[in-house]
């Protein structure tokens, strides 16, 4: 899809964590203190891959709130590496989403895009945790669909199906914008959506905190700033 193909887009739907909020920085900042010396010599990317596998497993099981998914996933990584943080420390990690930073270009890019498009977010998060992240982004989304509202986590199709119900526009008027091939591009493409890949890990090895997956996005940018430039190009 060329940028001229964006002319018929009405809604931009966004993943939040990994795309707009730097979840990998947040995960590492909270995970290393739990592991202590057990993480010595383990690279950030290796820890992120361990964590990503654990989180995907937790999200595929019976629905639990995201703060509990975070705590369970961290506990799995700690157990694998021989660390044993207490329940209070794990619970604090579960609530640490409120401290995760926005990527430096997210707020400005969203404000720019909002002048032309309606914006929605489809996020694997709890309502209250996303509300804290949203304050860092500085925009009011036209629609917010959280995992807590749906009772499921992407890559479940249900999250997108709820979005379709709420947006009330044909799928060909939607462009889904996301970093994770696993959580977002694979299910979005299966449901007939066009997608834009914000390749935040451009130039880095591995898939980081998202399990590896294969998909063919319609548009690729390495940042939200670059995506906004393409959208207005």
Image: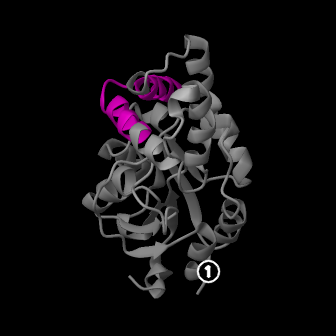
Its colouring scheme is: one colour
Magenta residues?
51-78
x%, y% of residue 203?
48, 69
Which class describes the residues within 10 Å of circle 1: few (<14), some (14-19), or many (20+)? Answer: some
Label count reads 1
81 with respect to 26 (left or right): left
Which quadrant is the C terminus positioned in? bottom right
x%, y% of residue 53?
35, 39
Chief secondary structure of the magenta portion: helix
Q: In this orientation, which residue lies closer to the viewer: 195 or 101? A: 101
Q: In this orientation, which residue lies closer to the viewer: 34 or 154? A: 34
> Which residue corresponds to the image point at 25% horizontal and 59% vertical from the top-left?
190
Is residue 163 within the magenta segment? no
**Residue 94 seen in the current view:** no
With respect to residue 92, does 117 lie above or below? Answer: below
> Which residue corresponds to the image point at 31% horizontal and 33% vertical from the top-left?
60
With respect to residue 114, does 160 lie above or below? Answer: above
Q: In this orientation, which residue lies closer to the viewer: 167 or 80? A: 80
Q: Mark 1 highlights which residue? A: 229
Is residue 72 within the magenta segment? yes
With respect to residue 143, does 181 lie above or below? Answer: below
> Which residue corresponds to the image point at 30% horizontal and 54% vertical from the top-left?
187
Q: Secondary structure at mark 1?
A: helix
């Amino acid at each position: 899809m060329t940028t001229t193909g964006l002319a018929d887009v009405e809604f931009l739907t966004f993943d939040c964590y990994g795309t707009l909020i730097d979840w990998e920085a947040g995960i590492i900042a909270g995970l290393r203190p739990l592991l202590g010396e057990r993480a010595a010599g383990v690279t950030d990317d290796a820890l992120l891959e361990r964590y990503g596998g654990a989180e995907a497993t937790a999200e595929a099981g019976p629905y639990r709130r995201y703060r509990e998914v975070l705590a369970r996933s961290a506990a799995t990584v700690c157990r694998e590496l021989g660390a044993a943080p207490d329940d209070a420390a794990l619970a604090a990690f579960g609530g640490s989403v409120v401290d995760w930073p926005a990527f430096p270009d997210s707020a400005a890019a969203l404000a720019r895009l909002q002048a032309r498009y309606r914006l929605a977010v489809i996020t694997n998060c709890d309502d209250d945790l996303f509300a804290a992240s949203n304050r860092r982004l500085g925009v009011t989304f036209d629609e917010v669909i959280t995992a807590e509202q749906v009772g499921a986590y992407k890559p479940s199709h249900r999250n997108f199906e709820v979005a379709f119900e709420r947006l009330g526009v044909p799928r060909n008027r939607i462009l889904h914008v996301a970093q994770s091939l696993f959580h977002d591009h694979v299910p979005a493409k299966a449901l007939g959506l066009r997608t834009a890949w914000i390749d935040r890990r451009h130039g880095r090895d591995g898939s980081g905190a998202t399990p590896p997956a294969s998909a063919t996005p319609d548009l690729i940018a390495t940042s939200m700033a670059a995506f906004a430039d393409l959208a207005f190009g």
